[in-house]
Amino acid sequence: MKALAILAGLLPALARAALNVTGSTCTVTPLPSTGGQEPDDTPQILQAFKQCGTNGKIVLEEGLFHIGQVMDTLSFNNVDIEIHGTMRWSSNIQYWLRSSLPVTYAGRSTAWRVGGTDIRIRGFGKALFDGQGQLWYDQNRGQSNQNGRPISLTLWHAKNVLVDGITWRQSQFWHTFVAYSENITMTNLDMNATSNSQWSTVNTDGIDTWNSNNIFLQNWTVTCGDDCISMKGNSTNVYASNVHCYESGCAVIGSIGSNAGQPDYVSNVYYDNFTCTHSSNAAWIKTYSGSGYVRNVTFANFNFADVNQPIYVTPCIYGSSGCDSSRLKISDVRWINITGTSRYNIASAIHCSGAAPCDGFHFENVNIKNKDGKSTKYLCSNIANQGQSGIPCTGTCPASWPQQLSGDG
């Protein structure tokens, strides 16, 4: 009995030993597994965020951290977060479906919200985020979005943020989401959400942004990210460069304009130096027939291989109606130095709204060949000043043109 009493007294101290506080630095070490049971490192991590999240440093040391709870950390201020180990989110799907944190957009939710100002999250190429996504892909059985299925990391009302040197494997849903945020830099990120079963991953986007501005993305690799890099409504001043996308929609604007009562604006986006391998699209603008605009977008220095539809523009995505009545204006879009091979015989398909024709479109050094040597088509509808656009239109693009092809068009 005396030994049991001593052990009981030691247990709180052992738990506290996972968190060491020295001045303004909090260092967290992973808890060991006991009796075959996985521990939950979330309480220690959250305590470190609370104690050292202002004018401090948080260090997650090497090893495996088990994340069994949502993390809502919205008040960081001038903090360095160093991640040297693996963060593995628990396999308790029912918990996440009940408890993941809302992010407003399209009913989506997240496992971790990060907010505040002057936040630096560094992984040094060693940090690994493991979402155990295969469990999610299998239970979802190839269906569409699922309420409660969590985005891995969301920057939420965040300002002046650096995220660098992190690897993702098997994310639960989207890898990252940036919302209501500004001055965001995300560099040297590697994401892979490949399914190992008959079921597809379904919406494991690399990044989606919404209501955010001044975003800099560089040196990304995204595999099976559905949309690799995607700018949604009210995203402005975006520069993305040195991105390699495998098995995904490569550089995307949209989808936007799904709510006629809520205008969506996307402007000043520059996609530079993208490689797209066996992707669904290379340079893609997809909207619904709502309100707002897409303005001043450049796709530059793209190289791709075996892409379903390299260049695609539509005002009625996913079979929605109103293709030619849409007032969502798409203008001042440039495709510069675009080279590669298409899976089928369509190099580009551009259908703009008859009610709001696209203008300021421009092709410069666009050279797309069919991978089997067939002649390629450039389909165009409702492009103002088409003769000065440099687009070698060979036919019209129907309003009902599919977003993905299953054969030659």
Image (cartoon, rainbow, N blue to C red):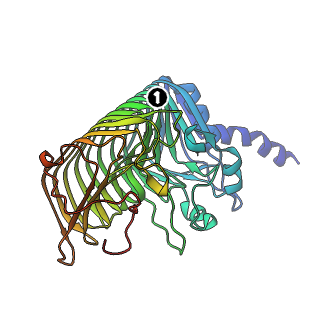
Residue 61 x/y as whole percent = 48, 44
Q: Quadrant of residue 182?
A: top left
Element carrying mark 1:
strand
Q: Is residue 31 visible?
A: yes
The residue where tag 1 is placed is 158
Quadrant, the C terminus: bottom left
Residue at the location (47% across, 42% down)? Answer: 177
Q: Is residue 315 left or right of residue 151?
A: left
**Relative height, residue 55 to residue 115 (above, below):** above
Q: Is residue 146 left or right of residue 54?
A: right
Residue at the location (47% across, 30% down)? Answer: 180
Residue 295 x/y as whole percent = 30, 36
Under mark 1, the amino acid is: Ala
Residue 57 x/y as whole percent = 46, 29
In front of the other: 200 or 172: 200
Judged from this view, the residue extending furthest toward the right is 1
Q: Is residue 110 visible?
A: no
Query: How many residues crowd mark 1 within 10 Å: few (<14), some (14–19), many (20+)?
Result: many
In front of the other: 384 or 15: 384
**Relative height, residue 319 to residue 27 (above, below):** below
Q: Is residue 254 left or right of residue 277?
A: right
Residue 25 x/y as whole percent = 48, 28
